[in-house]
Image: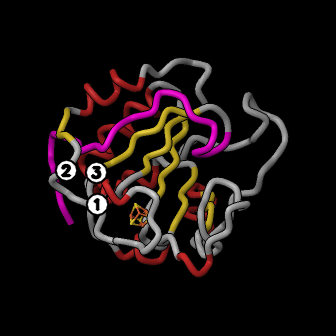
Amino acid sequence: MSNYSDLVRIAGVVPESVVDGPGLRAVVFFQGCPHHCPGCHNPETWDPQGGEGVSPDEVWRRLHYHPLLSGVPFSGGEPLAQPAGALALAKKVRAAGGNLMIYTGYTWEEILTFTSPEIKELLTLTALLVDGPFLLAQKEPKLLFRGSANQRIIDVPSSLAQQKVVLWQEKGGGRDGLAITGGAGD
Ligand code: SF4
């Protein structure tokens, strides 16, 4: 697993998106992905030497985060391949009052076996996590916020508290019409 320490290697950012999680969100696309899923929509993000390496402060500046945003999804690429950078950015998201969503090609069960303290702390700051690789054979264009049926939208605080996978349920209410928590500790 790569560790870029103080730099985050990114493919790019999108300051406003409505397709990467509930509500209006600013998206960070991490650079580098070891999964190489056939049919991946972002194969240009696979090369861990591609994109550009920038400080977490610079990534945050480029997001132009503002109070009308619901939060930030980390997409890719594979965000969990850069635990230190992802954690530094996650702290900025939470400090701004945003909730954090992570797209990862690892399954929840695989993530729980990781020993990285940064990933363990990152999970405590995460509201939603979409897990697992994109599987072309299970591609389903109508799925909400994910590409194939094997991928789950996981309610991370509830899953950590109950020590089992708890799937996110779309709920009424909240600023963006969806009730979600910002992470364990909310
Ligand atoms: S995990 Fe995501 S970015 Fe990586 S190859 Fe699979 S679909 Fe592409």
Disc 1 secondary structure class: loop
What residue appears at the point 30 percent right and 62 percent down from the top-left corner?
33
Work out how far the residue at label 2 is from the one at label 3, CA to CA, in angstroms.
Answer: 7 Å
Q: Which residues are magenta?
A: 1-22
Say whether mark 2 is within 8 Å of ligand 1: no
Instruction: Name the residue tied to disc 3.
Output: 31
Q: State which quadrant residue 67 falls in.
A: top right
Marks 1 and 3 in Cβ contact (< 8 Å): no
Tag 3: residue type? Gln
Display colour scheme: secondary structure
Dividing the image into 4 quarters, which one contains the N terminus? bottom left
Amino acid under label 1?
Answer: Trp
Residue 86, image x and y in percent? 32, 46
On whether residue 180 falls in the magenta region, the answer is no
Report if residue 8 lies within the magenta region. yes
For residue 119, say whether it is visible.
no
Crowdedness of circle 3 by 10 Å Cα count: few (<14), some, many (20+)?
A: many
Spot occupied by residue 34 in the image (x, y as percentages of width and height): 28, 69
How far apart marks 1 and 2 lie (CA) works out to: 8 Å
Residue drawn at (36%, 76%), measured in percent from left and top? Answer: 113
Q: CA distance from mark 1 to mark 3?
A: 7 Å
Whether 81 is drawn above or below 73: the answer is: below
Q: Residues within 10 Å of mark 2 (few under 14, many from 20)?
A: some
Q: Are marks 2 and 3 in contact (CB under 8 Å)?
A: yes
Q: 44 or 7, which lies in front?
A: 44
Of all residues, the one furthest to the right in this rendering is 172
**In the foreground, 122 or 177:** 177
Counting the numbered discs, the total is 3
- Per the image, the residue denoted by label 2 is 50
Please name the residue that numbered disc 1 is placed on.
Answer: 46
Q: Is mark 1 within 8 Å of ligand 1?
A: yes
